[in-house]
Each structure stands twice: as C-alpha cells, then as structure tokens.
Image (cartoon, rainbow, N blue to C red):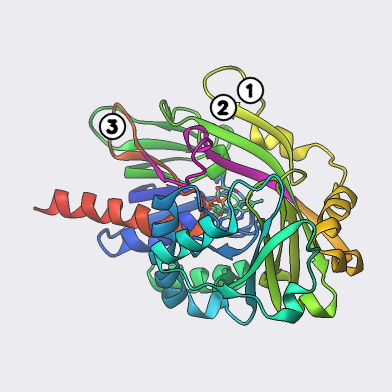
C-alpha cells in the first residue's frame, strides 16, 4: 500500500464504497479500508433488503418524503441490483397500531405513494379479527450480493485503492496537516488529507475519532431467512405500525427474510458517553434464535405463516440515532471532527439515504473549489 491518500474511507459497506466512488470523481488517490476480507458483509448484507418508498414512515413525513425520492434514484442507478418482481403488501393491524387505515390512506395520498386495496385472494390470507385493512403498494428489494459485485467493479474501474482485511485501529487529526491513520495493532501508518469514517456500528469505536454529539443506539438484531409457502412467494408483506412483522424477498439468498419488531432486536443499548459494551463484543456472543416466537405471533395475523420453512438466522448490529427514536425518523448523521473538519463520521440510517450523504459531500467539494 502507498502511504498517502487524498481521501481514505474507513469501512467497506455500501456507504463506504459509494462515497469512495463519489470522491474519486474529484480526487486523484482514494483509498478504501475494510477490516473484513470482502466488501458488504455486515449491515449492508444483514438487513431486510427493503428499498424504502416511504410507507414505513407514516409518523415521519420528512423521512417518508425523502425515501420516495431516493428510492427512484436508487432503482435507476443500481437497477441490476434491485428486485421489483414482487407485490408489496402493507396491512394495518387493528389493535396496537399507531396508525389507522384512514390515516395511512391520507398519508399516502399526501405523498403520492401508490396505494390500492389488495386483491381479494391476498386479503383472504389475513385474519380479519386482527387486521383492519390490506393494501397493495410499490416497493423494491435490493440484492446485497449483486451490489457487492457491482461496486467492486466500479471501484476497480475508478482506480480506487482497496485494502481488504485491514482494520483501522487509530486516527490522529490535528488542526492542520494530513490526518494519520494507523492500521491494525501496531501496524502500518498512513496519511490522508481527508478521512471518512463509515463504520456504522463501529462509528464511535475507532481510536482518536470523537463523534461527540452523535448519540447512537445499537440493537443486536436477528433476521430469519425462510422459504415462504407458495401464496406468499410473490409478495413482500409488512404488518404495521407497531410491534408487528415483515416477510420480504431477500434476493441475496433467493429466499425471504422474516423479522418482527418485538423479537428481532435481542439486545438494545445506547452509546452516549457512559461505559457501554462494544458492538463487536455483543455480536460475538452466542445467540439463540427467536424464530419460534416471531412465528407464533406473526401467524395470528397471517395464518399461512405456519407453513414457512426456516433456513437460518443472520445476526448483526443495527445502529440508529438515539434522537430519531421518538419520531421514527431516519436522518443521516454527518459529523465533522471539532479539530479538523476533514475528518468526517457518517451514519446513513437506511440504504437510500446515501443520496442525502452524497449531496453534503458534493456541496463540500464545490465549496472548496470556488
Ligand atoms: C436488521 C437490519 C435491518 C435493516 N433493514 C433495512 C432495510 O430494509 N432497508 C434499508 O434501507 N436499511 C436497512 N437497514 C439499515 C442498513 O442496513 C444500513 O443503513 C446500511 O447497511 C449501512 O451501511 P454502512 O456501509 O454504513 O454499514 P456496514 O455495511 O455495516 O459497513 C460498515 C463497514 O465498516 C467495517 N469496519 C468497522 N470497523 C472498522 C475498522 N476499524 N476498520 C476497517 N473497517 C471497519 C465493517 O466491517 C463494515 O464492513 C437495516 C439494518 C439492520 C441491521
């Protein structure tokens, strides 16, 4: 590896890869450092694969509206990594739901989200005692493995230096001069004019990077991979809005994911200055699947779930901003280091928020150029 970069990105998830590509349009020597032996192995792979259209956020109009715009862009740019072959179904639960059908319909009208009553055979799959309305919506799923291949290709094409299997241990930023980056325990030292920390769950855990003000909430989450029975195969079903569940196509494994708002998070904790376990330590523990609980509850609303076949569970950390919990928003965090604004830590919240991040980076570049 050469020792100086115009920009060095820490973390080869979806965010790190796309940010590296965007920066390479402006900067000559861009380096991407990922501690795993492959790109997109963590949250960018272990998730629900939903390209949000906005339906999920009836309690946060801003997040819903930006999802609508970003989703179209995502589907256009990553078109070969998107599965749009299924019908998205949103069902509103009768009890415990934070929205009513009339509210949901008004919200979709306001945001111009396509919505119509689900076909009779789909509606008949749900328990009418517990579900008050079933809608057909428009939503896609992304294929994380296709994204990995696509991004690897683009990174190579753009001449980005890729350092896989290297962990960034420490970063040292002074007010002026290049930023120093130490790889591994006692490993190689590098320098860069700019550093972007896109390590998601590890955002606040890189030595020397102070993300003060970015209050993180972590959850150890379980995504069950299942084979759905025939009537659910062409569908992505979400029961909302509260402690319910989703069964969505998971293109990377040619099956469906099954997650439940109450049971998917196994452990929840905040990283707000007080001593807290590291996300790596929590993830490394052994975890017993909660699939039976998810199934028992989900089948009350969608009885045909009894026929799904469990394949396996994926566990990883989900990280969100503590401040967004109450209003269910998914804003981005774009945090410039207090000593050196060229050291930036970024949390995207959801995959399509990448475009909000790119807007900020692009503005930074223009500001510097003029
Ligand atoms: C259960 C779950 C469900 C979700 N569902 C959805 C969904 O349906 N739709 C949606 O849009 N979003 C969803 N999300 C959120 C989405 O997955 C994330 O917003 C997105 O993947 C974050 O991408 P990233 O590149 O920031 O993180 P990651 O993909 O986690 O990448 C961070 C990378 O940094 C690397 N790294 C960490 N520390 C170091 C270090 N010291 N040195 C070098 N490398 C390091 C890691 O190995 C990792 O590869 C979900 C998340 C979870 C966990």
What number is the disc on residue 271? 2
Q: Are marks 2 and 3 in contact (CB under 8 Å)?
A: no
* Residue plotted at (25% across, 61% down): 26
- Label 2 neighbour load within 10 Å: few <14, some 14-19, many 20+: some
Q: Position of residue 263 (x, y in %)?
A: 77, 44
Would residue 85 be counted in the magenta stretch?
Answer: no
Closer to us: 137 or 205: 137
Compute the Cα span from label 1 to label 3: 26 Å
Q: Which residues are magenta?
A: 315-334
What number is the disc on residue 276? 1
Q: Is residue 101 above or below residue 266?
A: below
Q: Are marks 1 and 2 in contact (CB under 8 Å)?
A: yes
In this rendering, position of residue 343 left or right of residue 83 = left
Compute the Cα span from label 2 to label 3: 23 Å
Q: Determine if the C-beta at disc 1 is less than 8 A from ligand 1.
A: no
Q: Secondary structure at mark 2?
A: strand
Q: Position of residue 251 (x, y in %)?
A: 67, 73
Q: Quadrant of residue 39?
A: bottom right
């Amino acid at each position: 590896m050469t020792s100086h970069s115009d920009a060095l990105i820490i973390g080869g998830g979806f965010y790190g890869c796309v940010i590296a590509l965007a920066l390479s349009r402006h900067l000559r020597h861009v380096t991407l450092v990922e501690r795993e032996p492959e790109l997109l192995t963590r949250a960018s792979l272990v998730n629900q694969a939903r390209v949000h259209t906005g339906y999920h956020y009836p309690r946060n109009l801003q997040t819903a509206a930006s999802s609508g715009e970003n989703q179209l862009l995502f589907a256009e740019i990553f078109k070969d990594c998107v599965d749009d072959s299924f019908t998205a179904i949103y069902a509103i639960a009768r009890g415990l739901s934070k929205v009513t059908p009339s509210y949901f319909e008004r919200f979709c009208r306001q945001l111009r989200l396509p919505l119509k009553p689900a076909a009779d055979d789909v509606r008949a799959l749900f328990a009418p005692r517990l579900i008050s309305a079933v809608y057909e919506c428009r939503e896609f799923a992304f294929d994380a493995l296709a994204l990995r291949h696509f991004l690897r290709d683009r990174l190579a094409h753009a001449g980005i230096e890729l350092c896989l299997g290297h962990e960034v241990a420490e970063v040292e930023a002074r007010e002026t001069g290049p930023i120093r980056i130490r790889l591994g325990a006692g490993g190689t030292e590098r320098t860069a004019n700019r550093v972007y920390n896109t390590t998601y769950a590890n955002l606040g855990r890189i030595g020397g990077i102070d993300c003060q003000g970015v209050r993180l909430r972590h959850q150890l989450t379980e995504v069950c991979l299942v084979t759905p029975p025939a009537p659910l195969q062409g569908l992505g079903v979400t029961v909302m809005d509260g402690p319910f569940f989703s069964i969505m196509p998971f293109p990377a494994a040619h099956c469906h994911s099954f997650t439940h708002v109450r049971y998917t998070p196994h452990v929840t904790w905040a990283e707000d200055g007080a001593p807290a376990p590291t996300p790596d330590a929590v993830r490394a523990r052994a975890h017993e699947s909660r699939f039976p609980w998810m199934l028992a509850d989900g089948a009350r609303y969608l009885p045909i779930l009894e026929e799904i076949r469990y394949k396996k569970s994926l566990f990883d950390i989900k990280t969100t901003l503590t401040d967004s919990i109450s209003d269910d928003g998914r804003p981005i965090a774009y945090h410039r280091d207090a000593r050196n604004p060229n050291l930036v830590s970024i949390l995207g919240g959801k995959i399509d928020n990448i475009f909000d991040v790119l807007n900020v980076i692009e503005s930074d570049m223009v500001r510097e150029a003029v």
